[in-house]
Amino acid sequence: MEIKSNDVLLVIDVQNDFCPGGSLAVADGDAVLAPIHRIAPRFAHIVLTQDWHTANHASFASAHPGKHPFEQIELAYGPQTLWPDHCVQGTRGAEFHPKLNLPQAELILRKGFRPRIDSYSAFFENDRVTPTGLAGYLDDRGLTRVFLAGLAYDYCVGYSALDARRLGLEAVILRDACRAINLNGSVEKIEAQFSEAGVRLVDTATLEQKMHDDQRLLDAAAQASAEEGIRQGIEDEENGRIRPIREFFDEFEAAHRHLRVAHTDKRPDR
Ligand code: VGL
Ligand code: ZN
């Protein structure tokens, strides 16, 4: 597998509230930084997403008297898990992790800003029909394969990957560059959907190794073809199928002798 110019790295929700110390901390959440930073230079295009809720957002348990975080309720569009308040617009928890260093990212996409609808996916909100605009953006730019990394594997990363497939895009999750919330079997559930939908999982190290191996094969092929060209040339010359290369050199030298003489004449004494 190689990374091509129509690939995009989608870095999902690497925000303070999803990292250790945050209000919806994912275990080891900041461990995604190292693999993301290692693989990012391979990509020509990077998009960051930011969970971006209003205060009193419908996905917050605090907005539903008597309800607690991680319980389920029914909203207008169906079941919704309730979360602790997190990623409220303009707060420190909503900011990217201070060590996230991807200044080359071309787009920061915010989602979950409609007070009555949650949005796990970077493509559609949780009603599954309200678009975020990302599909149009990628289509406009001819980006047809998404690699995904970030938080959380079993929610925003997973839903984004499944929606990408629904839109006819290729989706590859960089597994070691994600961490999961793992709530009531959420990892197993979403992984069953991954295999159904054709979402691929790969580790960044494997991807790097494959790219390295592919490059070595290409180099070897180029080398072999150059050698074959030379061998064929020598054989053709020996069989009289082409003029000896020496003749070309001699003619060239003869034709340009005056230049060399003129040149050497001008050279100062050494
Ligand atoms: C997420 C739960 C609530 C995520 C966002 O980024 O995976 N999870 N909001
Ligand atoms: Zn959220």
Image (cartoon, grey):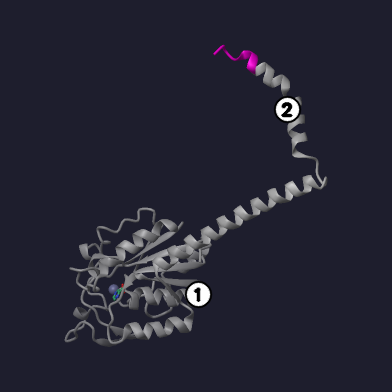
* Circle 1 SS class: loop
- Residue 47 in the image: x percent, y percent? 40, 62
Farthest residue toward the top?
269
Q: Is residue 253 above or below residue 147?
A: above
- Residue 118 in the image: x percent, y percent? 32, 76
Which residue is identified by label 2?
Answer: 253
> In terms of sequence position, does the residue under pointer 1 or pointer 2 come before the other?
1
Which residue is identified by label 1?
Answer: 167
Q: Is mark 1 within 8 Å of ligand 1?
A: no
| Residue under the point 49% across and 79% down | 198
Q: Nearer the viewer, residue 209 or 100?
A: 209
Q: Nearer the viewer, residue 31 or 98?
A: 31
**Magenta range:** 264-270
Q: Is residue 263 above or below residue 60?
A: above
Q: Is mark 2 within 8 Å of ligand 1?
A: no
* Circle 2 SS class: helix
- Residue 130 in the image: x percent, y percent? 41, 75
Q: Quadrant of residue 176?
A: bottom left
Residue 157 located left or right of residue 22: right
Q: Quadrant of the C terminus?
A: top right
Residue 53 in sight in this render:
yes
Ligand 2 location (quadrant): bottom left
Residue 260 located left or right of residue 183: right
Give the mark toward the camera: 1 or 2: 2
Give the residue type that dot 1 points to. Answer: Leu
The mark found on residue 249 in the picture is: none
Q: Nearer the viewer, residue 203 or 213?
A: 213
Give the residue type that dot 2 points to. Answer: Glu
Farthest residue toward the front?
238
